[in-house]
Image: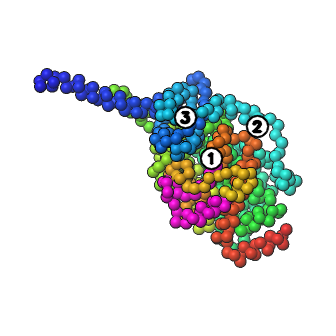
Amino acid sequence: MKRWLHFWPIFLLAVIFASITDTVAKNNLSTNLTKSSTTGSKSSFTVYRLNPVTKQQSEFLHDLLVSNTKLDFWKAPKVAGGQVHVMVQEEMKDKFLKSMKAHNISYSIMISDVEEKISKLREKANRSRQYNWLRDDPSSLRRVHFNLAQYHSYTEIANYLDQLNAAYPDRTTVKTIGLTHEKRPIRLIKIGRPRTFVKAGIWIDGGIHAREWVSPATVLYMIDQLVTQYEVNPQIQRLVDEMDWFVVPLLNPDGYEYTRSSTNPEVRLWRKNRSPMSCRILPNGMFSRPRQECCQGVDLNRNYDWQYGIEGSSNDPCSEIYQGPYAFSEPETRAVHEFISKRRDTIKTFLTFHSYSQILMYPFGHRERTYTSDVDDLRSTALQAANALRAAYGTQYTVGTGADTLYPASGGAEDWARGRMGIKYSYLFELRPGGEVWDGFLLDESQIIPTAREAFEAVKVIANRTSAMFTPKNLRDEIRETVWNYL
């Protein structure tokens, strides 16, 4: 007995060491897939398409998404059988692929060299462009010429809104609803004709995630249609006469401009805003000192005050889905909150545009199988909208809540709009491409007009439903008669 007591400290250390070793093994991928700093030699990036076929495989990938690994999930894990797209840095590749093999997850390469892909797209865009006006939309009818078939800078977008306001003062008003961290004005255009009655409002925003360039491009197309087609399209005129449209084409201009500044994939594929650095302390174990890690930016679509921080978000500043220190901590989301909360009695529809996956979502997204009391109406309207969208080019959209169709995520804008503001028709669009297309966030400019045009068909369905629900019938009849007499 005394002899055993003599060796018990060694035995205890062995047990502790074994426990530490087991913990390290379980977290091996997380601790080894931490991105190096942007200093040093150039690193290449590859996008992989993963194919989880079991629940355990999907859960493993979801754990990677919410952990501190710094893997960049373009298309997040949902259910077994669904595709997952993830961008991996060269230094992480071996460990990442070994981990996939260890979990029997099959994979293929989507984009072998992301920076090369970005550079080729930029070279193509820099060539001489022709204005890509639609055949049924002649430029001779326009008072402002603007190429809708290209990705524009923040300055170009802001100038375009001002030009529209100058050319069409009878139906547009442009204002600044807030300033970003880098002091860029967040510009909003109101589209509508003055009426003697209180009109229902429709909110539209784009570009909340910096890398999703087709989102603001799509919203700009919708602005153009609502403003410039008023005289020639009876449906457009009725929608503008019956409702007020509040449109922010670029909600995250700091992040967007940052993604335009380099072909480096870590820059071009930036998701968050550009809030100042936030730091966290990382404990490194029993025998090493804690270290500090600092990162920039907040995921604005996790920063709204609805089930904030509950699911599908992170309190890690270095995570792609960092929710921020508290709800509405960011000037961009505060601007939306302050504008809409003052008009919550009149704004009846809230539409926010993202990419990618081709999904039309309605609340609630923070938990699976969690719905509003009028979910049948929301779903029916969404299905009609998806059908109208499909009629344009045959593009198929999935319809459902974010949690049911993609993954649970709390703090989202569309959930807040419905849950906190009481806005009945609240939807999130995940635009082109679908999972079978390999471009992901690097969608070619040739896809802008088709993407925007089909999405606008869906928006018109939702707008018509909004008008039918909230514009009195006698006023709708009066407006229709006025429209036909005008034309």
Is residue 277 among what the camera can see? Answer: no
Amino acid type, callout 3 = Ser
Task: Give the label, 3 or 1, closer to the camera.
Answer: 3
The residue that disc 3 covers is 106
Residue visible at 71% across and 68% down in the picture: 242
Is residue 351 among what the camera can see? Answer: yes
Q: What is the C-alpha distance between the residues marked 3 and 1?
A: 21 Å
The structure's colour scheme is rainbow
Asked which secondary structure carries label 2, the reply is helix
Q: What is the C-alpha distance between the residues marked 2 and 3?
A: 35 Å
Compared with 394, 104 (above or below) is above
**Mark 2, residues whose alpha carbon is within 10 Å: few (<14), some, or many (≥20)?**
some
Compared with 322, 167 (above or below) is below
The residue that disc 1 covers is 357
The label on residue 125 is 2
Q: Where is residue 39 in the image (x, y as percent from the top left)?
A: 56, 26
Q: Give the range drawn in magenta.
A: 357-385
